[in-house]
Image: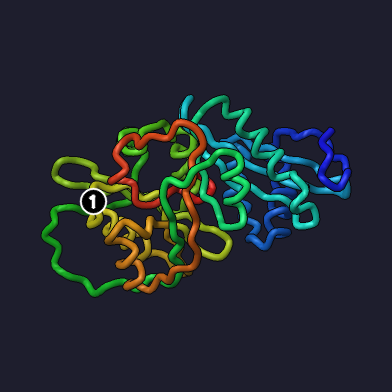
Amino acid sequence: MLTDRNGIRFPPIRGLGPADLEDCAALSVDRGWSPEKAKWSLLLEHAEAFGIDAPDGGLAGAVVLARYGKDLASVGMMLVAARYGRRGLGRALMEHLLDAAAGATVTLFATDLGKPLYEKLGFQTIRRSAAFVGRFRTAPATTDNSKMRSRPAMAADMAAILDIDMTTFGADRGQILTRLPAFAEQLRVLETEAGLAGYAAAWRNTTSTVIGPVVAANAAAARRLISDLAAKVRRPIRLDLDPDRPGLPEWAHAHGLELMSRTAVMAHGDWNPRGNPDWLFAPISVALA
């Protein structure tokens, strides 16, 4: 049994699965988030989720661990029901998750509210992230002499997408990426004379369409992928970008996206830059650091 700081007893932390989708969505709503059922479905099926059942029904808290090979993982959807806040449940969930990670380096996107807890658990900030949201304004067409074009991805492109991502990210995200064709509304690749030079996806969230991941050889390639994805979207767009990396944040703002929130990207364990981070322009989601 788990006992909170007020002496209330909870069942032990347990694994969550697809059958817990409605309770997970309700937990999101309880904390003022959107239900995000599509994202929860993806995570409950293809990552490891942990939860605490509430004595009065539903979930008192939940958290998700996504593994990228043996030595890297990410944390997402860390939530405790408002009525059980500040009673130690969040710390219990995170300690359980870190035990499950078994020494792997773990990363996450931290809000100002959650950051103090993560710092107490040994997480350190490695960079910043900013969410840009709004209706994307398409720029007037211009002559393109770059010899690069984006197109919808085909099944035959998946092997190349996985190779590019492995080289760029420095760890195997295949368990999630292979679900992108079914999960995302759009998946595009960037072609050059030398072959594929990036890929990006757009997927529907409750209130916006998230463009991510964006993996590209340079900022111009990233802009091309984002623009071509955004051209087919008729609702607000969200882009999560590094505000300290010049180029895309200013470009996103010029195209109608406003800065909505900031988070800290944090890591627990032996953090060293890996892969080719210059190609990483946007995450899959802030739930998948």
Residue 158 visible to the viewer = no
Residue 155 location, quadrant: top left
Q: Is residue 102 left or right of residue 275?
A: right
Residue 53 vs 134, above or below: the answer is above
**Left or right: 230 with respect to 176?**
left
- In the rendered structure, the answer to whether residue 81 lies left or right of residue 226 reads right
Q: Is residue 238 visible?
A: yes
> What residue appears at the point 60 percent right and 39 percent down from the top-left corner?
121
Q: In the picture, residue 53 is in which quadrant?
A: top right
The spot of residue 225 in percent (x, y) is 30, 56
247 lies above or below 198: below
Question: Of residues 40 and 97, which is closer to you in this image?
Answer: 97
State the residue in front, 62 or 162: 62
The residue at which mark 1 appears reads as 218
Q: Where residue 244 sits: x, y (%)?
A: 34, 58
The total number of labels drawn is 1
Which residue type carries mark 1?
Answer: Asn
Q: Please give left or right for residue 4 compared with residue 159 in the image.
A: right
* Residue 163 screen position, x and y as percent: 32, 33
The residue positioned 74% from the left and 45% from the top of the image is 88
Q: Given the current orientation, which residue lies at the most extreme left position?
A: 145
- Badge 1 element: loop
Q: Judge the density around disc 1: few (<14), some (14-19), many (≥20) Cα neighbours within 10 Å.
A: some
Say above or below: 4 vs 149. Answer: above
Q: Which one is nearer the viewer's eye here, 231 or 272?
A: 272
User: Residue 116 at x, y = what percent?
Assistant: 60, 50
Residue name at image x 14 percent, y 44 percent:
193
